[in-house]
Image (cartoon, grey):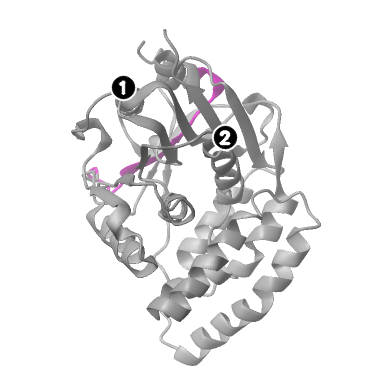
Amino acid sequence: MQRTNVIPRKYISYPKESINNNSLKKYIHLIKGVILSPLYWGIAYFLPTPGLLFPQYCAQIGFHLIFKSLDFRNAFSLLFSPMDSVRYFEFDFIWRAVNKMPVHSYLDVSSPRIFPLMMIYRNKSLIVHLNNPTIHDLHVTKSLAKSIGIDDRCRFYDKLIESIQLENSSFDVITSISVIEHIPDDKKAVQVMWDLLKLGGRLIISVPCAATASEEYININEYKLFTPDEKGFVFWQRYYSEELLKQQIFCVTGEPNSYKIYGEKKADSYQNNVTRKRTDLFYPFWREPVMMGLEYTNKNSISELPGVGVVAMEFIKNNQ
């Protein structure tokens, strides 16, 4: 099935990041994070913030890095800012879905690295295949896996998922957290993942969504995978409407066996937050869990979103 209409495009120009060489101010900012993060975590427990169990797991790895690997930089991130924004919701949904069944063969497609690495860390017999075409990002993942002491159970690939050479019907579970929206030929990518699943296997993914579909082009070539246009813009991501999900994903997988939607209470909250993160060197990362509880909520349908959100979905591959 081909797309039946043209998706509206949005062009977003982010200002260059501010440069601040004030080391004292940076240290003060980090100290504030150390002090305020536990307070904000505590407040979040009294709000409907999802995914608060996962940071506890991240803290375990953080202490591991301090006492066994002396990797203080990664330890700080895992202890005080292991995830941000809608990752709280996405990690919670996908972690619960993955752990509903025994997993013997697992592929992750370019998700935030801490999720698949956590799978390996907490399942001592599991070997995980990790694919990420962004070479620098994959190098960082390899380095963190080595610091944690799990690199011997990782299999790394630096290919676009559309061109990866793995045997079909190989995996019990495939996860991909907020990735498919960055792939121009999203339907082909989903088809490849679907073919790689065993019969009875689970594809668990999340993508941004909105009542009206759109595509974003930005002036920052973050992944260096696409060529900017003549004005310096590069494809960034798409927001899926209910109709676009049917056209590009469900036509391959069928309807999801389970799904949840999480989105803004007020339009533009997400975009304002993204802009600040890209431009403010002293962004208050400690407020993320409280922000998720106050500014976002569960939704019954994509069509009722006032702005944007994220939909997490679980598909089980049965005879079709």
Q: Left or right of 106: which side holds 63?
A: right
Q: Left or right of 234: which side holds 35?
A: right
Report the front residue among 207 and 89. 89
Q: Which mark is residue 154?
A: none
Say which residue label 1 marks: 195
Q: Residues within 10 Å of mark 1 (few under 14, many from 20)?
A: some
Residue type at the position of mark 2: Lys
User: What element does badge 1 sit on?
Assistant: helix
Report the front residue among 24 and 275. 24
Quote the CA–CA distance across marks 1 and 2: 22 Å
The stretch in magenta equals 229-243
Quadrant in the picture for the C terminus: top left
**Whether label 1 touches label 2, CB < 8 Å:** no
Q: Position of residue 115 (x, y in %)?
A: 46, 51
Quadrant in the picture for the N terminus: top left
Q: Residue at x 67, y 52 (%)?
A: 292
Residue type at the position of mark 1: Asp
Q: Is residue 280 visible?
A: no
User: What element does badge 2 sit on?
Assistant: loop
Mark 1 or mark 2: which is in front? 2
Q: Position of residue 5 (x, y in %)?
A: 41, 16
Q: Quadrant of residue 65?
A: bottom left
Q: Residue at x 24, y 39 (%)?
A: 160
Q: Which mark is residue 100?
A: 2
Q: Position of residue 57 (x, y in %)?
A: 57, 60
View extreme (front): residue: 125
Q: Earlier in the sequence, mark 1 or mark 2?
A: 2
Q: Quadrant of residue 166?
A: top left
Residue 278 lies, with reference to residue 281, above or below; the image says above
Q: Left or right of 154: which side holds 315?
A: right
Q: Quadrant of residue 198?
A: top left
